[in-house]
Image (spheres, rainbow, N blue to C red):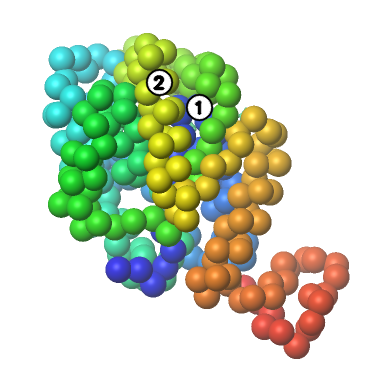
Amino acid sequence: MADGFFLTFEGLDGSGKSTQLRKLATHLQALGLGVTVTRQPGGTRIGDRIRGLLLDSKTDHLAPQAELGLMFSDRAECIAEVIAPALHGGNVVLCDRFTDSTEAYQGGGRQLGSEIVLQMHRTMCGGLQPDLTLLLLADFDQSLRRARRRNDRNATAEHDEARFEREDEAFHRRVYDKYREIAAREPDRVVVIEGDQTIEAIHRQISTLVDEKLRAAGLLPTASFTPGEKQMPENPDKARFTP
Ligand code: ADP
Ligand code: TYD
């Protein structure tokens, strides 16, 4: 499908995905690339309504299979409306969570297993795979504490997004283990990023890695020259990138 590049961020709630995604988007835009940012659940008008239903802690008695179906309905809409057109247009798409989240949370956390998730992915998403997935693994307790603090800050009397964070520790442990299993199964696609570093250190690591991948994909020239940099590239005859 792609002329562009499809990059997804994964990890437990509060592992720093959204923070890193925003910083990477700014970095890539400064290099002159077209960048599309989206998230799941959400990212479209219908997806935001599905997100409200899925994440609000007032939603109870939702069967795990119904939850699974809603995650994939949201994803199919996001692919059709946002991701596929952006990739066709040659953009770098940064997506906060994708099918690995469903495998980790519904497959692992809710114990539906991986197979049904992978089958639904083939059916509902045409098998679209990220070119690269960054799996942020920070300290387990720290991540959940951060996510809870952030959600308490953002919650209103009518609406919150705490439904998954309220699950018990065993649920989140199963999510964590499933993420590890996915990373071990698909080492070419999934890169594990150690999340217990400063925001800046993680950003440097991610931007170096992503620049490399984009060069390999032909979306950045092989010798890049960042605008405002004091020194010239080693070989100035090599392709120089001017946004
Ligand atoms: P996620 O999108 O994975 O749920 P966020 O990016 O929203 O995580 O981060 C959750 C909270 O933790 C935010 O308040 C954010 O500022 C903070 N945070 C993110 N990364 C780090 C880090 N490396 N060190 C300390 N705090 C962080
Ligand atoms: P979100 O705010 O995107 O995550 P975070 O707290 O990490 O910033 O919340 C999305 C929640 O939905 C999160 O708890 C994980 C869950 N989720 C699933 O259970 N399955 C899925 O397929 C997706 C995309 C998310």
Cβ atoms under marks 1 and 2 closer than 8 Å: no
Q: Quadrant of the N terminus?
A: bottom left
Pinpoint residue 115: horizontal percent, then vertical percent: 22, 40
Residue found at the far right of this picture:
231
- Residue drawn at 79 percent across, 75 percent down: 233
Does the numbered disc 2 mark a residue whose Cβ is under 8 Å from ligand 2? no
Q: Which residue is mark 1?
A: 14
Does the numbered disc 1 mark a residue whose Cβ is under 8 Å from ligand 1? yes
Under mark 1, the amino acid is Gly
Q: Secondary structure at mark 2?
A: helix
Q: Earlier along the polypeptide chain: callout 1 or callout 2? A: 1
Left or right of 41? Residue 3 is: right
Left or right of 18? Residue 178 is: left
Residue 172 circle label = 2
Q: Nearer the viewer, mark 1 or mark 2?
A: 2
Under mark 2, the amino acid is His
- Residue drawn at 61 percent across, 56 percent down: 209
- Residue drawn at 29 percent across, 62 percent down: 84
Residue 137 versus residue 229: which sits nearer the camera?
137
